[in-house]
Image (cartoon, rainbow, N blue to C red):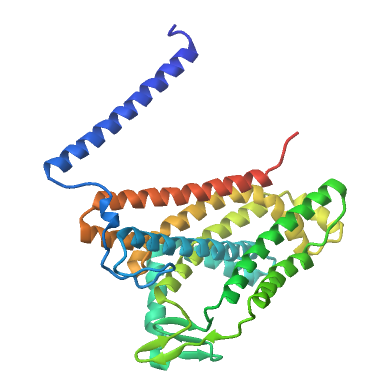
């Protein structure tokens, strides 16, 4: 029986699984024994207790009288917002820098190369300190803030700008804008499938523009067409009204975006170089412009090489957002640290952090793997 390779493989895997289970059981039982010996209470019942601390920046409603669970949700929302925006801007900046590195313009290519080398070789934490210092030290105080057009006020307290006043019409327009983006994306996919199946080209640009701009306009008009705006006004030591982008959020977003963009630029450059030169020469023979060659020929083929390493960069950005605690941005890690200091529930707080970051990373991986499967070459 043991001469069979299949039997040996099953036996080895069973032994390995038993060893892993045994090690896990030992670690868990040892931890529980030590906690019981030291009379340390464990459990997540503390999440329902009153938090008792303020959170300076929040994207969902929160008061100090809310529970620790609500505080964790606020920290999670802050982390997701900065990670999503960071991925968006890093992708745009990195793609432009990667293309610029291959430019025939000597100066542009050298500047792009210098950007990549500098950003990749300076630690992210140090870059965050630099950006935070710029926003808090070089910008003027509140009473001497820089006014831009009467709607934007820049100072050490951040970027305070005019925002539509609360009204159902503005909310409807915002949701309609998101719906327009989704519908435009669906229409683009339909047009592409139609062209592949029948050869008939459906218009994409104007219908997409109509959906993205027309739907919000119709929703805005249909729900009362509000025209009032909440304009910031100086009151005491700070501006009141409108919306504000804090120095902490701006420094974190800018640092994450520019740092990760340097790595994405190299990924994009490698993907473009991986496309056979004959593809570009054939496109030139057809009379396509450089922009058309890049958009229609090179980048679609380079995506198959770009996406797998790009996924790693997205994961790095999401995890690097935990450095926000170093510059005072109240992300999930900052909330967890405050909770641990107040409750002593260190194991539970760290477990929540591990579970959340694991979920975020797995979600990004699943989405990118799905997209990679959509753009891959289908072999016959």
- Residue 122 visible here: no
Between 212 and 93, the one lying in front of the other is 212
Q: Which quadrant holds the N terminus? A: top left
Considering every residue shown, the one lying at the far top of the view is 1
Between 336 and 114, the one lying in front of the other is 336
- State the residue at coordinates (37%, 71%): 129
Q: Left or right of 140: which side holds 173?
A: right
Q: Based on the displayed image, in which of its 4 quarters is residue 269 positioned?
A: bottom right
Q: Which quadrant holds the C terminus? A: top right
- State the residue at coordinates (52%, 84%): 162
Between 341 and 14, the one lying in front of the other is 341
Between 226 and 338, the one lying in front of the other is 226
In this view, 64 is above or below 155: above
- Residue 312 visible here: yes
Q: Left or right of 263: which side holds 278?
A: right
In this view, 14 is above or below 39: above
In this view, 284 is above or below 224: above
Q: How many marks?
A: 0
In this view, 88 is above or below 28: below
Q: Based on the displayed image, in which of its 4 quarters is residue 66 positioned?
A: bottom left
Percent x, y for residue 186?
Answer: 71, 56
Percent x, y for residue 201?
Answer: 85, 56
Percent x, y for residue 11?
Answer: 41, 17
- State the residue at coordinates (64%, 52%): 271
Percent x, y for residue 206?
Answer: 78, 68
């Amino acid at each position: 029986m043991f001469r069979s390779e299949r039997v040996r493989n099953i036996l080895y895997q069973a032994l390995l699984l038993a060893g892993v289970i045994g090690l896990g059981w030992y670690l868990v039982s040892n931890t529980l024994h030590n906690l019981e010996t030291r009379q340390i209470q464990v459990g997540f019942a503390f999440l329902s207790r009153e938090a008792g601390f303020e959170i300076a920046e929040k994207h969902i409603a929160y008061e100090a009288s809310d529970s620790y669970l609500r505080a964790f949700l606020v920290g999670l929302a802050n982390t997701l917002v900065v990670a999503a925006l960071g991925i968006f801007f890093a992708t745009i900046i990195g793609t432009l820098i990667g293309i610029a590195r291959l430019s025939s313009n000597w100066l542009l290519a050298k500047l792009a190369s210098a950007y990549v080398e500098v950003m990749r070789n300076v630690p992210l934490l140090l870059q965050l300190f630099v950006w935070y210092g710029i926003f808090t030290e070089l910008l003027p105080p509140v009473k001497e803030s820089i006014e831009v057009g009467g709607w934007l006020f820049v100072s050490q307290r951040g970027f305070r700008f005019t925002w539509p006043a609360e009204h159902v019409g503005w909310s409807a327009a915002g949701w309609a804008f998101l719906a327009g983006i989704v519908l435009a994306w669906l229409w683009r996919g339909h047009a592409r499938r139609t062209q592949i199946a029948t050869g008939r080209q459906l218009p994409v640009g104007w219908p997409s523009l109509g959906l993205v701009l027309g739907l919000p306009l119709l929703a805005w008009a249909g729900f009362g067409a509000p025209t009032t705006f909440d304009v910031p006004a100086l009151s005491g030591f700070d501006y009141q009204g409108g919306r504000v982008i804090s120095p902490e959020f701006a420094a974190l977003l800018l640092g994450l975006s520019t740092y990760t963009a340097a790595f994405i630029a190299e990924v994009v450059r490698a993907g473009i170089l991986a496309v056979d030169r004959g593809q570009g020469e054939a496109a030139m023979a057809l009379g396509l412009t450089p922009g058309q060659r890049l958009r229609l020929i090179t980048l679609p083929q380079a995506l198959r090489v770009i996406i797998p390493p790009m996924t790693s960069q997205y994961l790095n950005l999401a995890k690097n957002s935990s450095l926000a605690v170093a510059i005072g941005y109240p992300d999930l890690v900052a909330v967890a640290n405050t909770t641990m200091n107040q409750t002593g529930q260190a194991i539970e707080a760290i477990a929540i952090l591990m579970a959340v970051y694991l979920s975020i990373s797995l979600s990004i991986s699943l989405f990118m793997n799905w997209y990679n499967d959509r753009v891959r070459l289908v072999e016959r």
